Image (cartoon, helix red, strand yellow):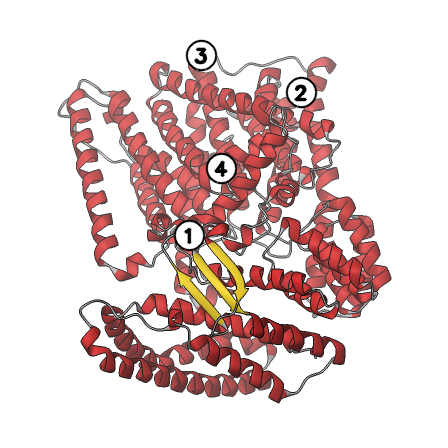
């Protein structure tokens, strides 16, 4: 092909109406920048900047061709899910809406994106350019993720932190949420259009065009990326959406004979997939430990149950209108169950991890009705396009988008990803395509021009201007605060940070900056400044994280011990099992001679440590009972399938109380005292049968050999730990002597060396433990030993604090 012809084709391609939209779609999704607190914040900036740039393009297009303004019905439809969240915001006067600005900017930017796409697109074929850039984006991000997974050195600077596949999206779930929406579209686009439009041809030959091959390649690579990323919600959504997409093609766009073949192939594939999954699950130990297999483990769901329970409780408090846009973060701290830490360590959720529950929080049951209307209307339009459109491309695209919507809605049940801009941006792009195709389906002449009168011009640009001005006015201060906070955090903590953060929070009350400032005030013992910081946090987001504990520490700093005790107890009403608060109250109660409060805290920490090691069979708070009495060992344990009963020795509790009291009064202790405490507690607990290894039935005669194996294991663990400590010490010396720029590379090499040199020990341990698991309840024994060590570690830290 001649150079001039290539240039002509390139020029024609660039001049296509949706070229700029496609380029911006790729640009938003192809870069990551970690200077803001989260990648998603940066993506919001990119989308907002994109629609601002497109405003210029739309203005030029309006004056060049006189395109009619977007109809008010479009603005109303897109804005309705947002508008219905405002009554709750106004009713509660913004009391619960810390993330209001963030969410509003996201929604306004996406509405403008859809409006501009709707206005500029003139025919179905225009969309091919957009789909091409979507495919390029999928390939680009998938390749980035694979490079990231294999850790190619030359690409490592752009990958952020962590080793999971996340490409430019900051999180594997966000990345997967982006991919699953576009995957069904490229599956359907890989099917030749000639076959989809000839329903009566039973023997039509499949002839793949370059476009079909590109779509198929994109589909295969994207599917492999989704599987490798191992986002469980995304994988489930992918399977269902692809199944429904193929069924949609079979029922609407294929002949009866082809339909039967497709249904048969789907049935066989589904059966084989189920069989393969259960074979792997039952036979492959590696698979049993994977993220996918964890779906069948109830403990893996606790991280979802907690925010869901808090959300359901909050919805009951305002069922009709909700609390307004961006209220989820506030409501979590208001309604999180007091015993939540027994089941999951995370205790700060920005979002509910279920789009349905989060939207009900924001808009109530009225919003739920609007939600159903919004999605019902979109699926109705898809159905009409498939049934009535004369364009085979439009019919296929509609079915593919329906699959993408289904994937999004399934992931929305379990994941926070659908709330993020990185996932909403492709979603709203697909929504725009549906609305465009629906317009082309019902309109004989979709391109409508209007006069450039003042009225038409105002109608065209007033809503756009309002959205842009409002979005930028909210986003700039928020972005500036995030940027400055990240800049401060990148340097080691110092007293200078206090002054910098005080100046920052005066401009904008960023709760992350305030929380960091409060802990700096504590560390530098600045009670007056801490009081002001606490006041600002109370105004911004009451009950935030450990704010109640910070109040208790402030009172303690000011020597007001009764007030410190009351503040800590008040915090514990909403968060019973936060170990730093329990340890704080153990020390305070001993200092004030309150034995009753002291043992109440012993009960709490015992129950917490038991749950940490998954000792109780029934995962209920009341299933673990803690008492004290006259028992032989320091701790007697009675284990049944229904509950776990701990009984502390009264004399040990007295000894523990006196040890804490002494160290608090004197402010110091001797190493011999701590060693005696640790040794006596450890030996006393060892006499309890609960901490013995239980031999399985049929192996009782091998008790002596089993005990020998247990001793060999203990010696091997000790030998391994000593070796690794020496190696770690050597590595630390080398790291200190190295240049800062080389440390990441050195740390990686040291981690590999540690793994290689520790492998012989690990292999021998695995052989020993395999035999022990066969003949004893070894895993149960390990958990109980870990519980014992945790008790000794925590109790000794309270009685003999390191700072002392």
Nearer to me, 542 or 261: 542
Residue 73 appears in the rendering:
yes
**Residue at 25% of width from left, 22% of height from top?**
251
Residue identified by numbered label 2: 460
Q: Label 2's element?
A: helix
Q: Label 4's element?
A: helix
Residue identified by numbered label 1: 299
Front label number (4 vs 1): 1
Mark number, residue 426: 4
For label 1, count other residues whose C-alpha is less than 10 Å away and answer few (under 14), some (14-19) or many (20+).
Answer: some
Mark number, residue 442: 3
Front label number (4 vs 3): 4
The x and y percentages for residue 555 are 80, 61
Front label number (1 vs 3): 1
90 to the left or right of 419: right
- How much space separates mark 3 and mark 2, taking CA atoms? 23 Å
Nearer to me, 733 or 328: 328
The x and y percentages for residue 153 are 45, 69
473 to the left or right of 104: right
Q: Label 3's element?
A: helix
Q: Earlier in the sequence, mark 3 or mark 2?
A: 3
- How much space separates mark 4 and mark 3, taking CA atoms? 25 Å
Q: Earlier in the sequence, mark 2 or mark 1?
A: 1
- How much space separates mark 1 and mark 3, taking CA atoms? 51 Å
> Within the image, what quadrant is residue 127 found in?
top left
Q: Earlier in the sequence, mark 4 or mark 2?
A: 4
The x and y percentages for residue 717 are 38, 81
Quadrant containing the N terminus is top left
Residue placed farthest to the left in the image? 203
**Residue at 53% of width from left, 61% of height from top?**
627
């Amino acid at each position: 092909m001649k150079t001039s012809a290539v240039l002509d084709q390139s020029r024609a391609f660039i001049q296509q109406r949706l070229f700029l939209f496609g380029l911006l779609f790729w640009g938003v999704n192809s870069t990551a920048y970690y200077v803001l607190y989260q990648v998603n914040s940066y993506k919001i900036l990119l989308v907002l900047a994109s629609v601002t740039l497109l405003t210029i393009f739309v203005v030029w297009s309006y004056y060049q061709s006189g395109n009619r303004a977007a109809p008010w019905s479009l603005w109303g439809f897109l804005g309705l899910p947002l508008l219905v969240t405002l009554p709750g915001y106004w009713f509660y006067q913004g009391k619960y809406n810390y993330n209001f600005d963030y969410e509003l900017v996201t929604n306004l930017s996406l509405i403008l994106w859809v409006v501009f796409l709707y206005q500029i697109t003139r025919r179905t074929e225009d969309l091919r350019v957009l789909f091409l850039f979507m495919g390029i984006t999928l390939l680009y991000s998938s390749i980035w993720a694979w490079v990231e997974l294999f850790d190619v050195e030359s690409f490592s600077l752009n990958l952020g932190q962590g080793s999971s596949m996340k490409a430019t999206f900051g999180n594997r779930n966000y990345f997967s949420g982006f991919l699953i929406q576009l995957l069904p579209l490229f599956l359907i686009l890989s099917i030749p259009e000639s076959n989809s439009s000839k329903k009566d041809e039973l023997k039509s030959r499949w002839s793949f065009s370059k476009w079909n091959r590109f779509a198929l390649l994109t589909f295969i690579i994207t599917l492999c990326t989704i599987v490798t990323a191992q986002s469980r919600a995304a994988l489930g959504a992918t399977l269902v959406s692809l199944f429904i997409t193929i069924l949609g093609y079979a029922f609407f766009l294929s002949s009866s004979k082809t339909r039967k073949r497709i249904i048969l192939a789907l049935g066989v594939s589904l059966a084989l997939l189920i069989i393969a999954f259960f074979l792997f699950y039952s036979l492959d130990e590696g698979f049993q430990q994977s993220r996918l297999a964890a779906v069948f483990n109830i403990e893996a769901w606790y991280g979802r149950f907690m925010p869901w329970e808090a959300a359901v409780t909050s919805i009951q408090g305002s069922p009709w209108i909700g609390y307004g846009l961006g209220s989820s973060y506030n409501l979590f701290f208001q309604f999180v169950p007091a015993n939540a830490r027994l089941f999951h360590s995370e205790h700060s959720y920005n979002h509910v991890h279920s789009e349905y529950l989060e939207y009900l929080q924001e808009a109530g049951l009225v919003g739920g009705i609007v939600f159903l209307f919004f999605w019902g209307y979109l699926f109705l339009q898809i159905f009409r396009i498939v049934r009535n459109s004369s364009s085979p491309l439009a019919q296929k695209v509609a079915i593919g988008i329906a699959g993408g919507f289904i994937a999004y809605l399934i992931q929305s049940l379990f994941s926070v990803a659908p709330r993020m801009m990185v996932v909403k941006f492709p979603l709203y792009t697909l929504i725009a395509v549906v609305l465009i195709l629906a317009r082309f389906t019902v309109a004989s002449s979709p391109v409508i021009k209007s006069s450039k009168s003042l009225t038409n011009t105002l109608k065209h640009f007033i809503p756009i201007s309002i959205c842009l001005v409002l979005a930028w006015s909210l986003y700039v201060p928020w972005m500036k605060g995030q940027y400055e906070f990240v800049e401060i955090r990148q340097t080691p903590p110092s007293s200078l940070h206090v002054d910098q953060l005080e100046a920052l929070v005066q401009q904008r009350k960023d709760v992350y900056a305030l929380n960091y400032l409060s802990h700096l005030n504590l560390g530098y013992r600045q009670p007056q400044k801490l009081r002001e910081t606490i006041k600002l946090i109370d105004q911004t987001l009451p009950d935030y994280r450990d704010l109640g504990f910070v109040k208790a520490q402030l009172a303690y700093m000011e020597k007001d011990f009764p007030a410190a005790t009351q503040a800590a107890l008040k915090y514990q009403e909403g968060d019973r099992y936060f170990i730093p608060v329990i340890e704080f109250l153990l020390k305070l109660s001993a200092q004030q001679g309150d034995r009753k409060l002291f043992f109440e805290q012993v009960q709490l920490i015992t129950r917490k440590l038991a749950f940490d090691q998954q000792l109780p069979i029934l995962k209920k708070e009341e299933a673990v009972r803690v008492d004290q009495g006259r028992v032989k060992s320091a701790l007697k344990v009675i284990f049944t399938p229904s509950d776990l009963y701990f009984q502390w020795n009264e004399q040990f509790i007295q000894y523990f109380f006196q040890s804490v009291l002494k160290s608090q009064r004197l402010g110091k202790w001797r190493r011999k005292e701590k060693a005696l405490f640790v040794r006596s507690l450890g030996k006393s607990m060892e006499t309890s049968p609960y901490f013995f290894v239980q031999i399985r039935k049929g192996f009782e005669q091998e008790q002596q050999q089993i005990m020998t194996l247990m001793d060999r294991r203990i010696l091997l663990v000790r030998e391994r730990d000593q070796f690794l400590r020496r190696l770690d010490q050597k590595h630390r010396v080398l790291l200190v002597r190295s240049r800062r720029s080389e440390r990441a590379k050195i740390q990686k090499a040291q981690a590999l060396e540690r793994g290689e040199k520790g492998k012989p020990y690990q292999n021998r341990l695995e052989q020993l433990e395999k035999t022990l698991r066969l003949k004893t309840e070894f895993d149960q024994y390990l958990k109980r030993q870990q519980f014992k060590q945790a008790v000794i570690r925590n109790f000794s830290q309270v009685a003999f604090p390191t700072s002392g």
